[in-house]
Amino acid sequence: MREYFEDVYVDPAASRRIDSRRHRLFLDFLDGVRQAGRSRLLDIGCGTGEFIELARARGWNAWGVEVSREAVQTAQGRGLQVALRASEGVEAERLPFADDFFDVIVLWNVIEFFMRPDADLAEIGRVLSPGGRIVVRTQNEPFHLTAYRLHRLFEWLPASHAYLGRSYVFHPLLWSRRTLSDALARAGFVDIVVANSAPTAGDPYGVGPRREAIVQAGKWILDRAARVVARLSGGAWLIGASMTAVARKPE
């Protein structure tokens, strides 16, 4: 998987495709977050810096860290404040920033790659200012376990390999509403709210108009169903493909 993403960042067209599919999510988030002056924001796992660039255009003092050397070089070449972070060893648990440095820290589909999530979340808490917020978007375990089991059941079908073979839908670490809330609480965060996340547009990692249309239609149907279930259950049942958690560091 690491080799796949390194290849993606070497290919400018593939990297732009991934960023463009998340563009609406980024803008909706930035339009909905209040800030005081040039607030400091950190994007962990920032890729080539699409979100950082959008945040800077809206007045944020935005930074990023990333484990892909190719992505960091591309982001720095665009004039963005992005640092290379080690992916293994003790150094991977240390962020190159002072205590209480950031007002908001975001993780867009990154926490599913954490090898030591408790240590990583504690380190994020260290560099987040008192009263600051952490925002985590990740895949939703119930949905993806169901999808994985269906994929295994029908993996003998050529279509199953065609549409899921290299899509990396199934990450080794999956989070549920409960496990993500518990992890954030163990790291000392409070006021934790977890809800269905709006889907990205189309298929960020695939190619071809036919697959794009099929994925987009499936996302639209699932998103509507997830909204209905969440409303009827008072937010207790999350069946969407992804979810977003928002929490605060105590003051």
Image: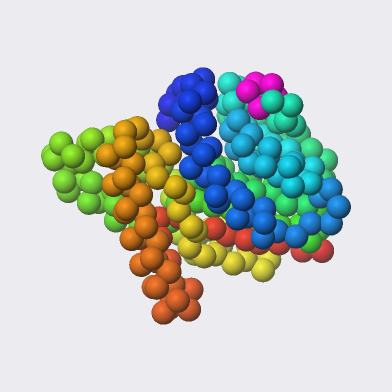
In this rendering, would 236 be left or right of 24?
left
Q: Is residue 68 above or below residue 211?
A: above
Q: Is residue 166 above or below residue 175?
A: above
Query: Residue at 84% of width from left, 56% of height from top?
Result: 36
Residue 6 in sight from this viewpoint: no
Q: What main secondary structure does the magenta stretch of the protein show?
A: helix
Report the front residue among 176 and 22. Answer: 22
Query: Residue at 43% of width from left, 39% of height from top?
Result: 204
Q: Quadrant of the C terminus?
A: bottom right
Q: Is residue 97 above or below residue 11?
A: below
Residue 226 image point, x, y percent: 39, 66
Q: Which residues are magenta?
A: 73-77
Q: Is residue 127 above or below residue 233?
A: above
Report the front residue among 169 and 80. Answer: 80
Q: Name, please, the residue furthest toward the right.
A: 37
Residue 12 image point, x, y percent: 52, 23
Query: Residue at 47% of width from left, 34% of height from top?
Result: 17
Residue 222 in sight from this viewpoint: yes
On the image, which quarter does residue 31 sit in? bottom right
Residue 243 image point, x, y percent: 49, 58
Residue 128 lies within the magenta run = no
